[in-house]
Image (cartoon, helix red, strand yellow):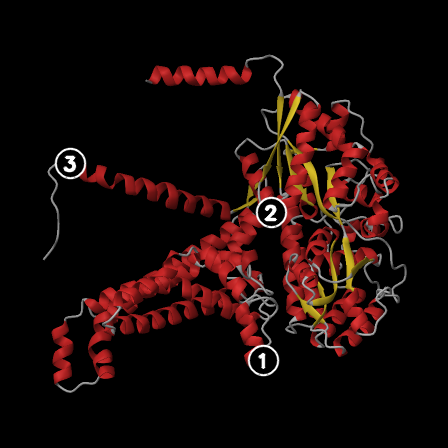
Amino acid sequence: MRIKLLAAALAGVGLFSGPARAQVEIQWWHSMGGALGEALNEVANAYNASQKEVKVVTSFKGTYPESMTAAIAAFRAGNPPHLLQVFEVGTATMMAAKGAVKPVYQLMRETKQPFDAKSYLPAVTGYYTDTKGNMLSFPFNSSTVMFYINKDAFKKAGLDPEKAPRTWREVQAAADKLKAAGQQCVYTTSWPSWKHVENFSAWHNLPIGTKENGFGGMDSRFTINSPQHVKHIEMLAEMAKKGQFTYAGRTNQGDAKFSSGECAMFTGSTGAQAGIRRAAKFEWSINFIPHHDDIKGAPQNSIIGGASLWVMTSKERKPAEYAAVAKFFSYLSQADVQMAWHTKTGYVPITQAAYDMTKKSGFYDKDPGAELAVKQLTHKAPTANSKGLRFGNFVQGRTVIEEELEAVFSGKKTAKQGLDDAVRRADEILVQFEKANK
Amino acid sequence: MEKRVVYRSAWLPYALVAPQLAITLVFFFWPASQAIWFSFQLQDAFGQSSSFVGLQNFVALFKDPNYRDSFTVTAVFSVLVAGIGIALSLLLAVMADRVVRGSFAYRTLLIWPYAVAAAVAGVLYAFLFAPSIGIVTYVLKGWFGMDWNWVLKGDQAMALVVIAAVWNHISYNFLFFLAGLQSIPRSLIEAAAIDGAGPTRRFWSIVFPLLSPTAFFLLVVNVVYAFFGTFGIIDATTQGGPATSTQILVYKVYHDGVKAADLGGSSAQSVVLMAVVIALTVVQFRYIERKVNY
């Protein structure tokens, strides 16, 4: 019995190491569920069908934090995937994990694959490069936050449905009218910290933290309790008190409140469009996010959300495997592949070439909202305040900010108190991260 | 009288307890000792560098006002869950015990909720009480004019998780109380009835004291349940929010350790949690058990 087993095991080993030029398998762990997951599998399948040397194997590992946790555990056990899709707030954590990841620019150079960080949209490049402009992870699915209005509700309240509010002053004026017309929920938002702290800062060219929002070093500290930030959160708290702002939750719960027609105005991800298109039984439009016209320099440009692909290392990794990953990246960089992904998923096109190609195809004539996101991301050339953010352990940091925002919106704290506490608590996390990653 | 089995063989008794011991060692003592070890360390997420920092993780914890708040939240939550859960199931058990016709059907129905996993119960209640689409919300808003939005209102969020947690655990308590009630000798109650004691008097003077061992056991179990077993419900509904109003200790351990990859801080929290539960159990056995009539 034992001999039989041994023989079987040996045969198994033989199977895998047999042919000298076997296909190289790449494990790709991702967090794209539902329709997005299907689109991702299509990308992998198309690549596998296009050549014989490399086989990309995708596995869905749950939400972004879950995938990241799984990959960290796998790395500790010595068996991480080749590719890991990491959401934008995990960027700093991945970057600091020097022995666990291989920067993309280094990989492409070592494997002699052509790669130009500048071919990406600046708002995308900015987020995933180091201070020298070297691309650290491979941009994949990028979104940004947009402003949606329910045109039917606007009509009913006697507002011009073709003129969406452009400033917060106009939003408030519209809110008064909508409320007076009996609108139950006037305005809501998904991703409160991403929209009202992170993107608010970028859109108004205000720093989120010192040291170029953390790009300049791990000793960055938050600056989200500036008078402008306090004023903005105060305004939201005031609107909440008047029943003009309905808090929906920390993730995308706002999406359903808008698409069901409950709320007339809504800020949420570009990715919300697919769901709204399917569910909304009313006319709606997608617009630039509102800004405060009394803050100089606004509007600047919005920042991206979504995720990028990180190349993970391990002791047993062979050069052939890295080469395979690099080849796959070259495939992913092709404009037609990117355009297919962009038009199928609603994520923004991340390279200039893909954007131009989509434009030429006439896609935006049918779906102007899809282009608006690019226009908002590239509204002005990104500054140190608006190219993104890079804070250690921002998964925890963002939770802290959201907790404090909730305390403000429910009237437990003033905007000033809440944001001061958010800065104090989030800074402690940064200090801890700095110490752990010395 | 002592119940004791005497084994002739020297190794047999050890062999018989070995599997249980092995499970306890591998799944309880080893992780617990790892947690203690990690709690004195500062580690990056990938475990590539770690340094011994002594009690620094603990000092940081207790300096954090939010962590101290989490204690209050946990205390309120466990008192509510254990208190309401035990009282309600005792009431149900007494009622079910008195029913003559169809008692089997009633009992079976009352046991059902226990078959529902905590996470599923959480999802069910999240739907029932969902701020815009929940059916209970519809009643609360439409009939009582209540401004129901637990996504933002801390007290309502607490009420929601308490209701879900109590509902999920009520069958367990019910079963034990029912068994306890049925083991009370009928003759005692009949004798009291003949002496002229009414149902209320009979309950408080005879039934309740005789049930006290069961009630005590359930108190311990319910507190432990509120501390650990309700994790799934909280994760599926409020995730500790709004602000930190439903962030019980075990949920914070999970969030900081698993989601935020702060192993040192999270381990320190779990060590503190371990100490709290051990202390509570000891207190319960030493002081409350003395008042129990076996």
Asked which secondary structure carries label 3, the reply is loop
- SS under mark 2: loop
Looking at the image, which residue sits at the far bottom?
A: B196
Labels 2 and 3 positioned on one and the same chain: no
Q: Which chain carries label 1?
A: B
Which is closer to the viewer, label 1 or label 3? Answer: 1
Give the position of the C terminus of chain A as an image quadrant.
top right
Q: Which amino acid does label 1 sit on?
A: Gly
Counting every numbered tag in the picture gives: 3
Q: At label 3, which amino acid type do we have? A: Ala
Q: Quadrant of residue B211?
A: bottom left
Residue B12: tell me if it is visible.
yes
The Cα–Cα distance between marks 2 and 3, rounded to whole angstroms, is: 53 Å
Residue displayed at 69% across by 60% down: A259
**What amino acid type is highlighted by mark number 2?**
Thr
Same chain for mark 1 and mark 3? The answer is yes
Q: To which residue does mark 1 refer?
A: B145
What is the CA distance from the residue labelled 1 to the residue labelled 3? 72 Å
Kindly tell me whether residue B283 is visible in this rendering. no
**Where does label 2 land, which residue?**
A63
